[in-house]
Image (tube, rainbow, N blue to C red):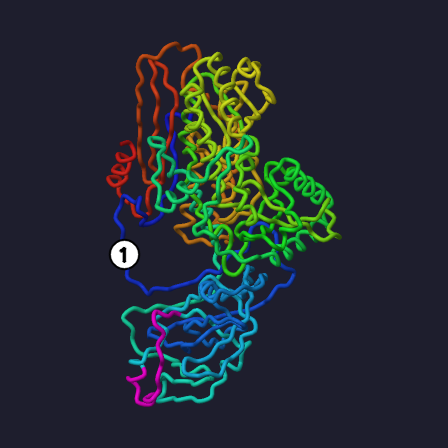
Amino acid sequence: MSPYASTGTYSSPAPQCSDRRLSRCQYTPRTEVTTAPAEPAASVQSGFTDTEVDTSCYVTGVGAMRVALPIVPVKVKAKGSGVCIDTYALLDSGSTSTFCTEELVKRLKICGQQQQLSLTTLAGANVQTATTVISLTVSGIDCEQPVELPLVYTRRELPIHDANLAKQEDIERWPHLQGIKLPQVDKGRVQLLIGQDVPEALTPLEVKKGERNAPYATRTQLGWSLNGALGMANKHTATSNFIAAHDSLERQLKMFWKLDTTDSIHDDTKGMSVKDKQAIAIWEETVRLTDGHYELAISFKNYPPRLVDNRTVAERRLLSLGKRLQRDTLLHTKYTEGMKDLINNGYAESVPEEEVHSSNSTVWYLPHHPVYHPKKPDKVCIVFDCASKHCGTSLNDEVLSGPDLTNMLLGVLVRFRQETVALMADVQAMFHQVKVTQKERDVLRYLWWSDGDSSRQPSVYRMTVHPFGGTWSPSCCIFALQRTAEDNRADFQPNTVDTVMRNFYVDDCLKFVASEEKGIQLAQELRSLLARGGFRLTKWVSSSPQVLAKDVKELDLNYEALPTERAIGMKWDVELDCFGYKISPSDKTLIRRGILSVCSFIYDPHGFVSPFTLRAKVIIQDLCRRKLGWVESLPSEHRISWQQWKQELPEIEQFRVNRSIRPYGFGKVVKYQLHHFSDASEVAYGATTYLRQAVLPSLGQVTSRPPEKDDDTKVGIDGCDTLRQT
């Protein structure tokens, strides 16, 4: 038995006042501060254009008063368009550029060009973000003289609070402002920010001011606006716009704790939303078997989709990609080979010349870029950017993603341990085995040069299968995989069909069998069953070489790591038939971000090594409690404990747990017992579960958590302890 068995813990500090919290929540009234984080730059370097626009925008509201900002009601329209929208515009003398919301662009039904925008934040940092550039014309509600806005950059939101919008009743409170009329826009909000690049709109034509510190009114070509403090507010809101935050790190931290607590093995069923049911209905209606593969429609929210031909975007992205490939000969070669494979394998096709400019269906082009797998640096994956925006929308925005049909990882792993013989296999290119209906393939167009020669004009191709990069593709492909089992249920053993439904984690099959004979039969039936849907099982691995010796090709008996090591997080030693860990510690700087990076690398779904990882999690929790910044150096006391933990980290590789919870040669089990043990302290609380078969115990699952920040009594902690046992 492992030395960790008696003290096994599974750790995850809970966030303060979350819905999982067992202790009391405390509320302290405070001033509300509204911030709008700028969108972080993409982690994959793909680039939209070589042009970068530097701009800065500082809009702040401070003080204890309600403050009016120079906001005017305006009429907005695009050049050559008959659509006119009434909205509010902020005249911002602190901005060097003009912005509008993506919602306004959609309402105007216009398109623009994509660029990279560099925003200077209040913190002085430059934030790179993608934007669409358009041209608008604006005029006052009661004024017909238009003002041209030649360069307007789109943003998802303009975080300007409604409290900063002056109303007519505010005017009537001040004698020096009498006679000024402020037109109102029905259900309007600020969707336009006009900066100093349009001085015509900001130039004061008349100013009305009163006594010291009284609000003043300014008339510009767009009309009257009110400025200054309006008096005490019931609720003070200080706004600060375009501030960049470490969003990706915060998401990584949340995911770090979430991985430990969300998986449940008692029930694999998941409820579906209305939109999920709508996506399933589309696939049920359109699914058919064509040339040995299932064909499903793209689950559009509306049909036809509201997409405007974005070839110009794809051309700019291809030009940027071409420059990158010219600098990297090896990448160029592998990328070109990957593009050829798409055509040769039937995953894509050339668009006939007569259809390039005269398609009867909606046309959309997918930019594409290379991505390296961190564990497979020699392999290049071509990813189609279904999130690329044009005219304020993207392909992913127009499609229902569908329900999460993936089996719970922990459930698959626990079932994988039930018997002494185990099988594992991988569906080859699973996403490329499900076809797209013919009439929808033009929304999956892409540009590429013949033979990878960037000196030529690019040719037009289109995917014939659901692309890797579409938000709907995982759900769609798992639907087709499970549909294969359902459609052929009558021709195969129930255990074979059940394996497809319950023992696959995305494209990886992890299955247990009671004997080698049953393993041989199951492997053969699985191959035959999935072949009927165009799915091919490869990379077979088993704890029994005899299973693979019978009519199973392409096996690798020396295959050590599970194919989904990034998701499984563990190593399966096939020869010893036990789970272990492969640790590749990297030298990270002694800052909070470096600690999170190292800890996130160890994914321990069973919680076997949680007594060890708990020590690091407690350090992270204390750093969060101290509100240490992501790039701040560790305090001296944590520096010592972290370095000691890091030195011991490689020793995890010596830890082993038998894959099978049934002892070899144990015989028939007539009675099972689950034994739960738990304990708590002021540092952590946890629970360990053992499966007892006859007289030999086997470590089943471990769980533990550090207590909440406010859990300062042993009674409260033991209460948590009892709940975790039950």
Magenta region, mostly helix, strand or loop? loop
Residue 616, by quadrant, is top left
Q: Is residue 542 visible?
A: yes
Which amino acid is tagged 1? Tyr
Quadrant including the N terminus: top left
Which residue is under mark 1? 27
Question: What x and y, as percent, mark residue 408?
Answer: 41, 34
Magenta includes 188? yes
Q: Name which residue lies at 37% across and 77% down.
A: 68
- Judge by depth and name the residue closer to the eye, 533 or 643: 533
Write down the region rendered in magenta.
171-189
Residue 534, by quadrant, is top right
- Judge by depth and name the residue closer to the eye, 582 or 536: 536
Question: What x and y, as percent, mark residue 479?
Answer: 45, 35
- The local secondary structure at tag 1 comes to loop
Indicate whether 628 appears above or below 150. above
How many marks on residues? 1
Q: Is residue 607 visible?
A: no
